[in-house]
Image (cartoon, rainbow, N blue to C red):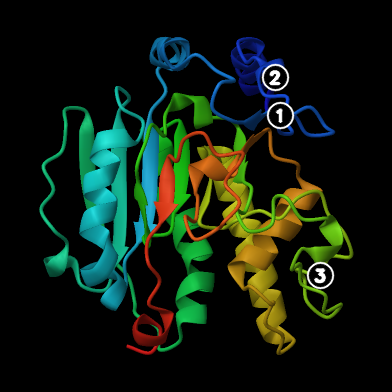
Amino acid sequence: MNEEMMLRENNQNINLDLGSRLDVKTSTTWGAPIMWEGMFNPDMCDQIHKKEGSSVALTVFAVGGYLDVYLETFLSSSEHHFMLGLPVTYYVFTDMPDKVPAIKLAPQRTMKVIQVQRHSRWQDISMTRMKTIAEVIDEQIRHHSTHVFCFDVDQFFTGRFGSEALGDSVALLHAHFYRLPVNRFTYDRNPKSKAYMETGDFYYHAAIFGGSWKSVKALAEACYLGILEDKKNNVEAMWHDESHLNKYLWLHKPSKVLSPEYCWDTSIPDSRDIRVTRLQWAPKHYDKLRSS
């Protein structure tokens, strides 16, 4: 994190009330806040980022049947909840540009549709997205957006997902793992993989990651290089790009961590910590979509 970004983030964190949620962990061991409802004043966060001129690029991949099933709901719900009041540019990556739904966008919000190759295996689609994200940041995003958020398409916004989530390097606690001990995290345990981890801090969900464009570019490039190295050695990480993302974020600690309310699975029976859901998992149809 450069000195200017660090100063900005420290100033924003001063306004966080880490003691407002005694029922959950609100800070990491290295001092990064873990964002929960009740810790921040949304209006104050918005004022800070508007004053600083923050702008956000949102990347999402909708390939094959994922476009038909999920994309319209994802984009429509984003228009109601994601970074309202800030300039937002959507980057939709798809193999079928003509089928991208026409969504009415609010002022200061634009959309760019970029055609990508469709791979025969969903694992390859998942893993090559890191290369694509790094390239589009370098070619386009860095010229007009201060921050980037990368999303899976099979989810939808249900509440405010706002400027409080912005930071230099932003990771998301996986809803199914955040209450479990570290020895139950599904890190890649194959020493031959570049994603190999014996232990870690948290288990992060690759359905959402973000930060300044520089930080996201660095993460995406590192993950892609790790994937390429694995391919040369005929290795495939257990959870593909998510395994490499967890390895990177263990070595390069995020400056802000989002709680599971930022990506919640309503099938989880224990929701005692979740006062509000900001993004929810959509029903999964893996058998059909990953074979189509």
Query: Residue sitting at 78 percent across and 76 percent down?
Result: 193
Does residue 140 appear left or right of residue 3 in this picture?
left
Q: Residue 259, percent across and down?
A: 60, 40
Q: Are marks 2 and 1 in contact (CB under 8 Å)?
A: yes
Q: CA distance from mark 3 to mark 2?
A: 33 Å
Q: Are marks 3 and 2 in contact (CB under 8 Å)?
A: no
Along the polypeptide, which appears first: circle 1 or circle 3?
1
Which circle, 1 or 3, is nearer the viewer?
A: 1
Residue tagged 2: 18
Label ID, residue 196: 3
Which of 233/27 is in front?
A: 27
Residue tagged 1: 26
Q: Residue 260, percent across and down?
A: 57, 45
Looking at the rendered structure, the kind of residue marked 1 is: Thr
Q: Residue 146, percent across and down?
A: 45, 30
Query: Residue sitting at 75 percent across and 86 percent down?
Result: 233
Which of 76/110 is in front?
A: 76
